[in-house]
């Protein structure tokens, strides 16, 4: 196995390192570097613009749509160097990671020219309208309809768990456009503007008082005829491309966040003496081993992409990785709580400096305050659900890869 990168990738690595050293605040790489809250605020405000000016946002997208046209291996090196420097990359999950790459892969030239630059410059925000009250895992049974009226689609139905719908300018919606065929064959992938009469977004308030996701109701909502991605009634294939992006993670850097988390857990266990406990030691070792498996699988994934390998095992890497990292992380966060013991119930539970390697979700909780570590614990409970549950990933591996008998289907046709 040769794990070295080609010389041109290493030249590019030097370029990125230089850019980071020049653009990150003075002292960033020094041991114990910290910013005051004011400095942090200013950094956050200026950093996205610097990334944009440097061309590092969606840098693998082609130049004609606003990207920098980096090769796959250059994109990997970019991600590795940002991760190594602990420099934040813009995290517009729905635009940069899901719908942007889906449009690049399946969109028409007009769609690419219109939507991609707006995603890239951050002027158009997105949400994902897939799940419905009775169609989550069984997504193909969805009931939202779109009927053509002249030059426009008229959309009716309800979506649920729609994260960030309250901030979105557009929703990528799966809608039934042909009710008379097999359920997967009658679905289209529409790009629907949210700012119009008939779109109602109702926040789903969680026990901590925040409403990160929503119910979205479409009542005779309009969308241009040409906003179908990947062709009429081809939405099932296009949705699976989006889900592939959602289930994947950055091949050679995805594990880094978990390594940092592992380091914090060892520090906590050392500080309170639980490191001496054989069970805690064994579970920490288990977590570390799994992170290394994740790292090696990332390299397999990268090799498969670079060599364009298409065997069944490679095709299953998305499904196996999603179930592997999400289940690993759920167990790891339970271990973190175990290390903390009863102090996990305190509002500042976790490392003494409060730092935890994940984005603090839903800032501004006022009714139920949690530390970054507890925020990560709570969110880990959802990681085996969103983007397709672990059970569904196992079904994919069992049926599509191992060739096991398919589970019986209850429905031959979509609901009318
Ligand atoms: C944090 C979070 C954010 C989300 N954001 C979005 C979003 O932005 N947009 C969006 O469209 N959706 C979103 N979702 C919804 C998510 O995609 C669904 O929750 C998920 O697909 C599961 O569907 P469900 O909740 O309806 O559960 P169900 O499908 O009802 O499943 C219930 C249980 O039954 C199991 N099960 C179901 N079918 C099978 C089967 N055939 N074989 C074995 N077991 C089975 C499941 O694994 C699960 O354990 C989000 C979910 C979460 C948790």
Image (tube, rainbow, N blue to C red):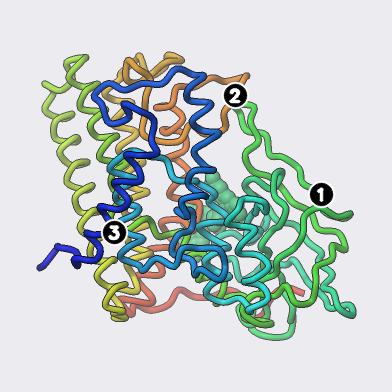
Front residue of 198/191: it is 191
Front residue of 370/88: it is 88
- Read off the residue under disc 3: 12
Which comes before the other along the chain, label 1 or label 3?
3
- Read off the residue under disc 2: 365
Give the quarter of the figure containing the N terminus. bottom left
User: Height in image: 382 above or below 41?
Assistant: below
Front residue of 282/271: it is 271
- Read off the residue under disc 1: 200
Alpha-carbon distance for marks 3 and 2?
Answer: 42 Å
Residue 319's image quarter? bottom left
**Helix, strand or loop under label 1:** strand
Quadrant in which ligand 1 is drawn: bottom right
1 and 3 marks in contact (CB < 8 Å): no
Which residue is drawn at the image coordinates 20% and 54% (left, top)?
A: 293
Front residue of 388/291: it is 291
- The residue furthest bottom is 181
Counting other residues with Cα less than 10 Å from the Cα at mark 3, is it few (<14), some (14-19), or many (20 or more)? Answer: some
Query: Is residue 181 found left or right of 61 in the rendered image?
Result: right
Give the quarter of the figure containing the C terminus. bottom right
Query: Is residue 109 found left or right of 291 in the rendered image?
Result: right
Alpha-carbon distance for marks 1 and 3?
Answer: 47 Å
Residue 223's image quarter? bottom right
Query: Is residue 256 found left or right of 6 in the rendered image?
Result: right
Image coordinates of residue 365 in percent, x first then y, are 60, 24
User: Height in image: 369 above or below 250?
Assistant: above
Which circle, 1 or 3, is nearer the viewer?
A: 3
């Amino acid at each position: 196995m040769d794990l070295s990168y080609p010389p041109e990738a290493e030249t590019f690595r030097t370029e990125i390192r230089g850019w980071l050293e020049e653009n990150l605040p003075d002292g960033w790489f020094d041991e114990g570097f910290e910013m005051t809250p004011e400095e942090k605020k200013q950094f956050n405000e200026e950093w996205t613009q610097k990334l944009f000016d440097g061309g590092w946002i969606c840098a693998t997208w082609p130049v004609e749509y606003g990207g920098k046209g980096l090769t796959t291996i250059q994109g990997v090196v970019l991600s590795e160097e940002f991760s190594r420097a602990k420099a934040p990359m813009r995290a517009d999950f729905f635009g940069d990671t899901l719908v942007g790459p889906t449009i690049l892969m399946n969109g028409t030239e007009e769609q690419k020219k219109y939507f991609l630059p707006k995603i890239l410059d951050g002027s158009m925000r997105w949400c994902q309208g897939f799940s419905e009250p009775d169609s989550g895992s069984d997504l193909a049974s969805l009931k939202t309809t779109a009927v053509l009226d002249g030059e426009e689609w008229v959309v009716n139905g309800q979506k649920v768990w729609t994260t960030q719908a309250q901030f979105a300018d557009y929703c990528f919606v799966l809608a039934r456009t042909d009710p008379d065929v097999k359920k997967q064959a009658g679905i289209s992938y529409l790009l629907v503007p949210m700012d119009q009469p008939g779109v109602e977004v109702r926040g789903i308030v969680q026990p901590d008082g925040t409403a990160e996701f929503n119910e979205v109701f479409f009542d005779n909502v309009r969308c241009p005829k040409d906003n179908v991605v990947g062709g009429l009634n081809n939405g099932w294939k296009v949705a699976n491309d989006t889900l592939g992006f959602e289930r994947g993670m950055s091949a050679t850097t995805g594990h880094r966040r978990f390594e940092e988390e592992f380091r914090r857990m060892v520090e906590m266990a050392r500080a309170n003496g639980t490191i001496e406990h054989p069970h805690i030691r064994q579970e920490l070792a288990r977590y570390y081993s799994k992170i290394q498996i994740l790292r090696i699988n990332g390299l397999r994934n990268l090799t498969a992409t670079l060599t364009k390998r298409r065997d069944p095992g490679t095709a299953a890497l998305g499904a196996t990785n999603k179930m592997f990292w999400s289940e690993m992380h759920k167990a790891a966060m339970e271990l973190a709580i175990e290390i903390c013991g009863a102090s996990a119930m305190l509002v500042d539970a976790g490392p003494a400096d409060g730092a935890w390697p994940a984005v603090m979700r839903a800032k501004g909780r006022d009714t139920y305050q949690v530390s970054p570590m507890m925020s990560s614990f709570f969110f880990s409970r959802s990681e085996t659900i969103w983007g397709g549950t672990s059970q569904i990933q196992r079904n994919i591996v069992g049926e599509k890869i191992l060739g096991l008998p398919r589970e019986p289907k209850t429905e031959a046709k979509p609901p009318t």
